[in-house]
Image (cartoon, coloured by chain):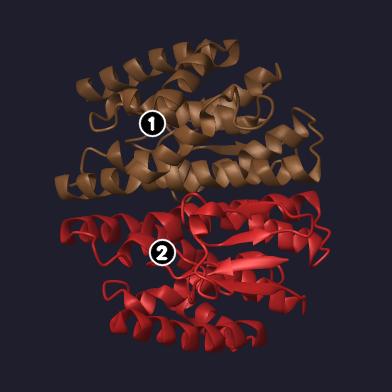
Chain colours: A brown, B red
Amino acid sequence: MELYFSPLACSMATRIALYEAGADAKFIEVDPKTKQVLADGADYFTVNPLGLVPAIRTADGAIVTENAAILQHVAEHVWNEKLSPDEQIKLRQWLSFIGTEIHRGLLAPLLDPKIPIEARKYLVTKGQSRLDYLNRYLEGREFVLERFSVADAYLATVLNWTRAIPEIDLANWPAVKSYHAAMKQRPSIAKALTEELALYQAEQARHKAA
Amino acid sequence: MELYFSPLACSMATRIALYEAGADAKFIEVDPKTKQVLADGADYFTVNPLGLVPAIRTADGAIVTENAAILQHVAEHVWNEKLSPDEQIKLRQWLSFIGTEIHRGLLAPLLDPKIPIEARKYLVTKGQSRLDYLNRYLEGREFVLERFSVADAYLATVLNWTRAIPEIDLANWPAVKSYHAAMKQRPSIAKALTEELALYQAEQARHKAA
């Protein structure tokens, strides 16, 4: 499998999922500004016309985009996970909640340096109830489901962005904060974070020099 | 199965999916303002703590939320659809794209009467590339996948909202416009739209009288 990623972007969830399985994969870095593959300057829009990471190239050569689809693919075909119908529906519910309400509806736009201040305020106000809900849900839980799943890989990845969002201090949602702290200790996540932080710093230096 | 819905909300996608199968279901209307079940005044937050529709109560009594999870459940357990691995991954990719980029990231916030004008402008600008992508994808296609799927039920439902969003005129995306026009002719969708439009008008009259 090949994973197109940018450092610390939501594509890190798939890296974590691959590390969990000790899976062999090729990681292809995409510069989020130029939308070029770092190694050879190839145009990433030819891989994903939206220019968004992640995308994967599966064993049979197909390109797949969208976190929920990619993460379920890794769970089923790399982890070889067999979920009960009840576990499957819960996994899909949580991947959708994280993807729509937390990632796309709240945290990703707040990372955009071009977002107007009025839009920031609106999103933060609307997002409060989602974080409150997540906090109540995570109280007393170690994982999103009954054991570590790709939903944890996804949630840990997007919660990581809050340190760059001044309005969202996880201290206000203590169960979310302690869940995130525990996740960062997990070897697959610690390894992914360390590696991608170094790549992110290199990316920032590159952009500064350009 | 029971479906908690509000008229013309994203829950209509599940109604369409149920009509496609001629499935027996109980439709429970939730007032989006009071968050009460219309029939008996029951508190909807006890069903979904976020107060969002849709939610379903499955045959075995479980509550499930989130469009992507509910629609896949209906496809698998009501339609009894058997997808190839390739079809399944494409369905998940499109449910995720519609849910994150079109529904949650673009159209739903633009329906909120409280959203500030600067936030509207920001979302419309960001959403342009997503609608352009959708338009290119739908050129020459009858359905999102190779045949009618729950992704069409979902996409037709959210595109319906554009008529209440002045900044988004589907005439600028002709393939999206003609796809949507064709979908509205499909019997399951035409029936759902007619029924929910009447319920929506009753809801508006109720709110005005309150």
Identify the chain of the residue marked 1, using the numbered disc in the image. Answer: A
Q: Residue at x 75, y 27 (%)?
A: A79
Locate residue B41, reporting x and y percent: 49, 69
Q: Amino acid at mark 2?
A: Leu
Q: Is residue A46 above or below residue A58?
A: below
Locate residue A210, reporting x and y percent: 22, 25
From the viewer's side, name the closer residue of B16 and A63: B16
Query: Which dot, 2 or 1, sits closer to the camera?
Result: 2
B164 with respect to A94 (left or right): left
- Which quarter of the figure is the N terminus of chain B placed in? bottom right
Give residue A31's mark: 1
Q: How many numbered circles does the render carry? A: 2
Q: Residue at x 69, y 29 (%)?
A: A146
A55 with respect to B19 (left or right): left
The reply to whether dot 2 and dot 1 touch (C-beta < 8 Å) is no
Identify the chain of the residue marked 2, using the numbered disc in the image. Answer: B
From the viewer's side, name the closer residue of B194 and A52: B194
- Which quarter of the figure is the C terminus of chain B placed in? bottom left
Tell me the SS state at disc 2.
helix
The Cα atoms of the two marked residues, 2 and 1, are separated by: 23 Å
B183 with respect to A131 (left or right): right
Q: Is residue B76 above or below residue A6?
A: below
Report the residue marked by disc 2.
B131
